[in-house]
Amino acid sequence: MKNITLLFIIFFISSCGQDEPVKETPIPKIAWMEVKVTGVEQTRKLSGQLNPREGAALSFNNGGYVTDVKVDLGTKVKKGQVLARLSQRDAKSLYLSSQADYVNKESYYNRMKVARESKAVSQQDVSDAKTELEIAASNLAINKKGLEDTVLRAPYDGIITFKDVDEAQQVYIGETLFKIDSGEGLEVSVFVPETLIKKLVQDKIYTVTFPAARGLEMKGALKEIGTQATRANSFPVVLYLTEQSSELRAGMTAEVLFVYYQDVAESILIPNSALGVGNQQSSFVYVYDQSTSRLKKVTVKPLNITNNDVYVQGNIKSGDIIAVAGVPYLRDNQEVILQEQDIEIFNFN
């Protein structure tokens, strides 16, 4: 019995003296990407106004009393259709008088040419008669135009979008009485600051929104860029909407989102998930060292946030590999393994 007890004690002591096997911590795998230096994407929202793509303000070239108005607001018209008339009394009188004068001067000139053939008059007399005929012809053309200008016609097919005239109303030269829209679509007129104008690209498509039509978003093609500043060092720019909507009307406010790239030395676009926040709100990323398979914590400066990405500056360069997920659970100098994947160049140029 004593021998059995002794053997048990020896076995127990021997068992306690053996070391337990050490469990090795697995090396974590990280999601990653290779980065590339790029420009910083900037967005600037500028307000403008919707206008007919082809539209015009219509007015008389003469002043006078309106005797007839043929159209109303919203009337569809054809090219050459009469919109309104002025009193023609004075203009018609001038036209008829100049017409009679021209007939007389023409007859006199013809008689003088015949008389010259028989040497009854001098060549100077013929020249004087010709000059008087030319003056009469010029007066006739002017008065004919004056008579025609008492009738206001549509310059092209379209819709009357503005009307500010009634019969018996006194109007003046150049006073806007109608506005016409060709119905070929709308355009956005906007003034762009001189600091932005060189960033714009002809025919590029930009996003356009409308405060009066919430939720409506359309595309506009940049068609015209002014070459001279006209207001507060801003240049006029015109974009054609690429589609139409029944919610939109000429005169409404439109907001254009101008997206452009601003060159910033060594700026890099990375996903927000790759950016960590350290002490005193400093920002950092983890850069993978391919020679040691370890992470290096690198401080960066955020420049601009766009969607789910952020532009940063710091001691990182094109070709560096950074961790893009699980950043709060990683640490400086930590050994990691890159997940198997095709190398993705994160570049939005």
Image (cartoon, helix red, strand yellow):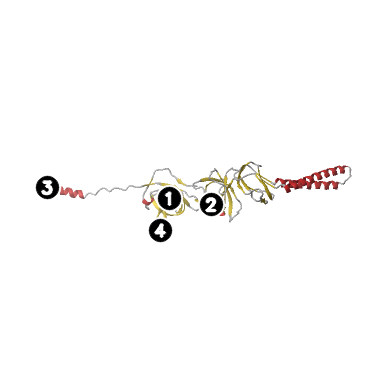
**Which residue: 87% across, 43% down?**
115
**Badge 2 element:** strand
For the residues labelled 2 and 4, the Cα–Cα distance comes to 35 Å
For the residues labelled 4 and 1, the Cα–Cα distance comes to 19 Å
Given the image, on which type of amino acid does mark 1 rest?
Asn
Write down the residue under mark 2.
Answer: 46
Query: Mark 1 packing: few (<14 Cα in 10 Å), some, or many (20+)?
Result: some
Query: Mark 2 packing: few (<14 Cα in 10 Å), some, or many (20+)?
Result: some
Q: Are marks 2 and 4 in contact (CB under 8 Å)?
A: no
Please give the label number shown on residue 272.
1
Query: Mark 4 packing: few (<14 Cα in 10 Å), some, or many (20+)?
Result: few
Earlier-in-chain disc, 4 versus 1: 1
**Badge 1 element:** helix
Q: Tell me where residue 6 appears, x and y as whole percent.
A: 13, 49
Earlier-in-chain disc, 3 versus 1: 3
Write down the residue under mark 4.
Answer: 280
Write down the residue under mark 3.
Answer: 3
Given the image, on which type of amino acid does mark 2 rest?
Leu
Q: Tell me where residue 261 appears, x and y as whole percent.
A: 51, 50
